[in-house]
Amino acid sequence: MPRFFSDDISDTTAIISGSDAVHIGRSLRMRLGDELTVCKNGVDYNTIIKSISDEQVVCEIKSFVPASEPNIDLTLFQAVPKGDKLEYIIQKAVELGVARIYPVITSRCVSRPDKKGFDKKRKRLQKIALEAAKQSGRGIIPQVEDIIDINKCSELLGELDYAFVCYEKGGKRLNDTDLTADSTVGVFIGSEGGFEQAEVDLCVDKGAVTIGLGSRILRCETAPLTAISIIMNLTGNI
C-alpha cells in the first residue's frame, strides 16, 4: 500500500499536499476510494481517498496502528566522507532504523563543507532520508541534522545511555555490551582516514566506549551499516 507522511492529521481526516499530492494523482494514478497509509509521529493511519487534486489529497481515516519503529532511539554520528558516500550511508541507515544522523567534521575529513555550503546539500540529504523512510515502512522521517564539530559530537554522545566510537584500532565487541531496549544509543564512525587519538580520547572522557567491528578494516560507508545492523540485532529489531 502506498505510504506518505503528513503533519495535517485530525481525528477523522489526513491531508497530503505538495509534491506528494501530485505524485499520488499523476504518477500513481490513484482514484477516489483507493487506500493508502499516512504516517505521523510513529503512527500508521489506514485511509481511503475522499478527494484528490494536484494541491491536496484528502483521506478519511479508517483505523490506525503503531508503526514498526525500533525499540531503541539510535543516532548515527558520521564523519563527513568524500564524494556522495554520505548519501548512500543516510539511505541505508534510515532503512536499518536510525532516528537521526549528525554529519561531523573531524581532523581527517578530506571533505570539509562549511555550514552555508552544507545547508544546500542538507536539503537533498533530507529528501533521501524521506524516500528511504517511505520505502522501508518507517513511522517517522529520520532527521539529517546540522553539521557539527568533534566537541559538540562528544557532548551529544555523553548525553546518551550508550555511546560507541567505532575505532580502527579495535575495542570492545558490541556483543559484549549490555545493550537494552528502550534506550538511547549513539554510534560514531570516522571518515576515510579514521580518527585522531585525541578525538577518541575526548569522546571516551565524555562516556563513550570504543568498539571494534572485527579483524578487518571496514570502509567508512561499510562500518556504519555493520554497526547499526549489529545494534539492531542485539536489541531484537532484526
Image: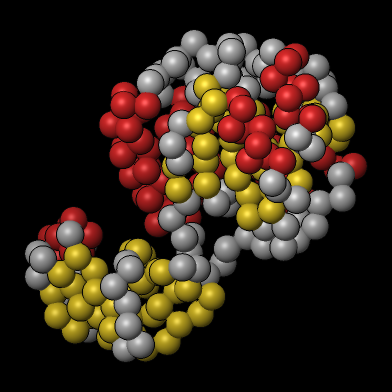
Nearer the observer, 25 or 125: 125
Q: Is residue 140 above or below residue 37?
A: above
Q: Is residue 135 left or right of residue 222?
A: left
- Residue displayed at 58% across by 32% down: 152
The C terminus: image quadrant: bottom right
Where is residue 51? Give x, y as percent.
14, 80
Instruction: Specify the color scheme.
Output: secondary structure
Task: Tell me if I can see residue 143 in this picture.
Answer: yes
- Residue displayed at 40% across by 69% down: 39
Q: Is residue 26 left or right of residue 115?
A: left
Q: Residue furthest right?
A: 176
Instruction: Give the mark count.
Output: 0
Q: Quadrant of residue 119?
A: top left
The N terminus: image quadrant: bottom left
Nearer the observer, 209 or 151: 151
- Residue displayed at 35% across by 64% down: 5
Where is residue 55? Give x, y as percent.
10, 66
Where is residue 36? Give x, y as percent.
32, 73
Task: Tell me if I can see residue 121 in this picture.
Answer: no
- Residue displayed at 31% across by 39% down: 123
